[in-house]
């Protein structure tokens, strides 16, 4: 093949031009006194990897700064016990057999003798753990940002009203004080909640108390139990809860187990009840009618929550 006569001369000129422009750069390390730092250079170049290991570094740190103090995992930390480990059960009471009759419905009456006695709800609110209070406040701020102050107040009022209607519907189911089936139909607002707990209601028998006040005479606190009845053959203090979010695990119920333990202890201490209870049941109902979650606390499971309740009670007394 033939090429134009000027092509190669142009390439040659271009190559020469590049060689002229590409001057050799002078490294800034060329001025370093290599004799002065020769030992350091030999040390760096003698091996590509360090001979130190995490274990040797830790040993060296221990020699220089002392041993590392490691915190115990939460499961291994010392279990804090209340100063007054008051028993949950009342030795003066026994397990009385269920006898059909009028349900206990003791009204909580405030008078000059008990105005200073706090309720279970108040004690739990005043001693709420910081992390739990933080998340509650953050949820409140987020809701106010979405709904506004007035919208949030209306939202809270609606939740409170639905809770009251739900409890009333449960009472009507057990007491059957209304004369006709039409009157027993619950409001549309809570029909989903009732549908949610329908299977649970089938397992509840031998109801003894509904919305009844309890008073712990020794520890001096008050409460109102939702229900005392047999659940699958076990006598329980039953607490009915509503929730917008699923709560399939007990840890999702926050202070509810402490509340139930407090009610059990108060009922066992109260002379208005001639029996005692060892078990608790938390029932979480859902507005969409999905099956409620039940959390059964037998006598073994309830004891840790009773101890935590005693600690919260002592904390409240110190405030």
Image (tube, rainbow, N blue to C red):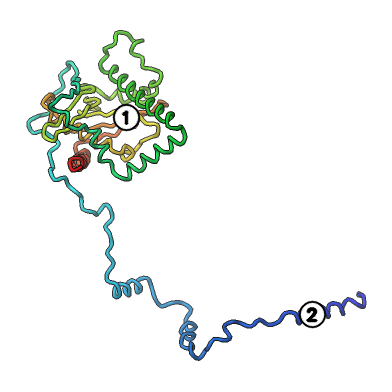
Residue sitting nearer the eye, 108 or 99: 108
Query: Quick check: 54 above or below 233?
Result: below
Q: Picture coordinates of residue 264 (x, y %)?
A: 18, 32
Quadrant position of residue 175: top left
Quadrant position of residue 76: bottom left
Q: Picture coordinates of residue 196 (x, y %)?
A: 37, 25
Query: Quick check: 125 above or below 198?
Result: below
Which residue is painted at 14% across and 29% down in the image? 276
Q: Tell me, for residue 17, which label it has, or none.
A: 2
Residue sitting nearer the eye, 40 or 200: 40
Q: Quadrant of the N terminus?
A: bottom right
Is there a contact, CB below 8 Å, between mark 1 and mark 2? no
Q: Residues within 10 Å of mark 1 (few under 14, many from 20)?
A: some
Q: Tell me, for residue 241, which label it has, or none.
A: 1
Quadrant position of residue 116: top left
Query: Quick check: 29 above or below 76?
Result: below
The disc, 1 or 2, on the residue closer to the chain's N-terminal end is 2
Q: Tell me, for residue 113, which label it has, or none.
A: none
Q: Residues within 10 Å of mark 2 (few under 14, many from 20)?
A: few
Dot 2: element = helix
Which residue is painted at 28% across and 67% down in the image? 68
Q: CA distance from mark 1 to mark 2?
A: 87 Å
Whether residue 83 is visible here, answered yes or no, is yes
Dot 1: element = strand
Residue sitting nearer the eye, 92 or 106: 106
Q: Picture coordinates of residue 318 (x, y %)?
A: 18, 43
Which residue is painted at 32% across and 23% down in the image? 164
């Amino acid at each position: 093949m033939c090429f134009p006569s000027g092509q190669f001369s142009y390439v040659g000129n271009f190559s020469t031009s590049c060689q002229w422009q590409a001057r050799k750069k002078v490294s800034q390390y060329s001025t370093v006194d290599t004799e002065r730092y020769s030992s350091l250079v030999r040390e760096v170049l003698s091996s590509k990897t360090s001979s130190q290991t995490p274990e040797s570094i830790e040993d060296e740190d221990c020699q220089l700064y002392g041993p590392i103090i490691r915190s115990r995992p939460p499961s291994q930390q010392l279990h804090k016990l209340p100063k007054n480990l008051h028993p949950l059960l009342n030795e003066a009471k026994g397990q009385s057999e269920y006898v059909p009759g009028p349900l206990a419905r003791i009204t909580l009456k405030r008078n000059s003798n008990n105005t200073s006695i706090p309720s279970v709800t108040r004690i739990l609110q005043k001693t709420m753990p910081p992390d739990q209070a933080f998340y509650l406040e953050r949820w409140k701020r987020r809701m106010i940002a979405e709904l506004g102050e007035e919208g949030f107040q209306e939202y809270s009022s609606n939740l409170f009203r639905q809770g009251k209607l739900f409890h009333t519907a449960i009472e009507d189911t057990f007491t059957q004080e209304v004369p006709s089936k039409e009157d027993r139909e619950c409001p549309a607002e809570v029909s989903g909640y009732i549908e949610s707990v329908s299977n649970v209601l089938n397992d509840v028998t031998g109801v003894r108390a509904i919305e009844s006040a309890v008073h712990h005479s020794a520890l001096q606190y008050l409460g109102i139990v939702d229900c005392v009845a047999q659940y699958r053959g076990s006598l329980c203090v039953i607490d009915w809860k509503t929730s917008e979010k699923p709560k399939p695990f007990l840890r999702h119920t926050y202070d509810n187990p402490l509340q139930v333990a407090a009610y059990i202890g108060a009922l066992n201490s109260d002379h208005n009840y001639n029996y005692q209870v060892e078990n608790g049941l938390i029932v979480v109902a859902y507005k969409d009618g999905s099956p409620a979650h039940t959390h059964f606390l037998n006598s073994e499971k309830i004891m840790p929550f009773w101890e935590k309740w005693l600690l919260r009670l002592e904390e409240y007394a110190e405030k």
